């Protein structure tokens, strides 16, 4: 498959010119050698992701960047990024030892532990682990976010972290249904 190059020599770009690297990575749980592709683009438009992925269908782990949203109407399934959600709580806890952030981190750590155990399993066994253990913890985390959020001041960093996480969680639940 030919590779598209917009710039033949990256050193020719001016020092004050903004550029973006779009990173695409295969699922490291699939058999075979993993693939990582860096797609250099002059802009941040979601059109770059749509053009690169073209007619690809599957699960796409993303942050909440709006540029991806059009893909989710074209047969691509959004899977929210727990690392982004976790980072928001980590930063809040580091800044002010928030008890709510600490609880969120603990709940997310339990999910990470389940995923860690699943890394060496077959696809079928990993799916059983996710549906048997992770789904329950994901639902509990989602319910905790929804029940705790009304007591948090709107516009605060904690409110933004909780809102982001509750939204991302819908996509992460997809992990329990995939292989």
Image (spheres, rainbow, N blue to C red):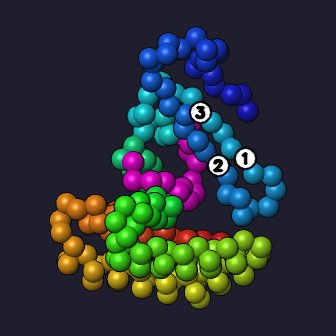
Q: Is residue 49 left or right of residue 124?
A: left
In the displayed structure, would residue 62 be above or below residue 131? above
> Picture coordinates of residue 51 (x, y %)?
52, 35
> Picture coordinates of residue 128 (x, y %)?
65, 84
Front residue of this view, candidates 68 and 121: 121
Q: Using a 10 Å C-alpha cutoff, classify the residue at mark 2 as few (fewer than 14 neighbours), some (14 to 19) or many (20 or more).
A: few
* Residue drawn at point x = 58 percent, y = 73 percent: 112
- Residue 108 part of the magenta segment: no
Q: Which mark is residue 132?
A: none
Q: Which mark is residue 39?
A: 3
At mark 2, the secondary structure is: strand
Q: Which mark is residue 35?
A: 1
At mark 3, the secondary structure is: strand
Q: Quadrant of residue 177?
A: bottom right
At mark 1, the secondary structure is: loop
Front residue of this view, candidates 13 and 91: 91
Which callout, 3 or 2, points at the residue further toward the start of the chain? 2
Residues at badges 1 and 3 in contact (C-beta under 8 Å)?
no
> Picture coordinates of residue 49 (x, y %)?
50, 40
> Which residue in the rendered view is the most extreme toward the right?
32
Front residue of this view, candidates 22 and 56: 22
- Residue placed under numbered mark 2 in the picture: 25
Residues at badges 1 and 2 in contact (C-beta under 8 Å)?
yes
> Picture coordinates of residue 47 (x, y %)?
44, 35
Q: Using a 10 Å C-alpha cutoff, classify the residue at mark 1 as few (fewer than 14 neighbours), some (14 to 19) or many (20 or more).
A: few
Q: Quadrant of residue 144?
A: bottom left
């Amino acid at each position: 498959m030919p590779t598209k190059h917009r710039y033949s020599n990256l050193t020719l770009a001016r020092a004050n010119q903004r550029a973006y690297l779009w990173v695409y990575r295969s699922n490291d749980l699939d058999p075979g050698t993993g693939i990582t592709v860096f797609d250099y683009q002059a802009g941040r438009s979601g059109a770059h992701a749509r053009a690169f992925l073209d007619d690809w269908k599957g699960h796409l782990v993303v942050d909440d960047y709006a540029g991806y949203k059009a893909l989710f109407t074209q047969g691509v399934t959004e899977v929210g990024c727990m690392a982004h959600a976790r980072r928001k709580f980590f930063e809040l806890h580091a800044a002010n030892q928030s008890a709510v952030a600490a609880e969120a981190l603990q709940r997310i750590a339990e999910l990470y532990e389940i995923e860690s155990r699943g890394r060496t399993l077959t696809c079928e066994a990993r799916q059983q682990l996710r549906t048997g253990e992770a789904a329950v913890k994901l639902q509990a985390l989602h319910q905790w976010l929804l029940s705790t959020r009304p007591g948090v001041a709107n516009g605060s960093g904690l409110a933004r972290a909780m809102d982001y996480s509750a939204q991302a969680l819908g996509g992460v639940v997809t992990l329990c249904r995939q292989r």
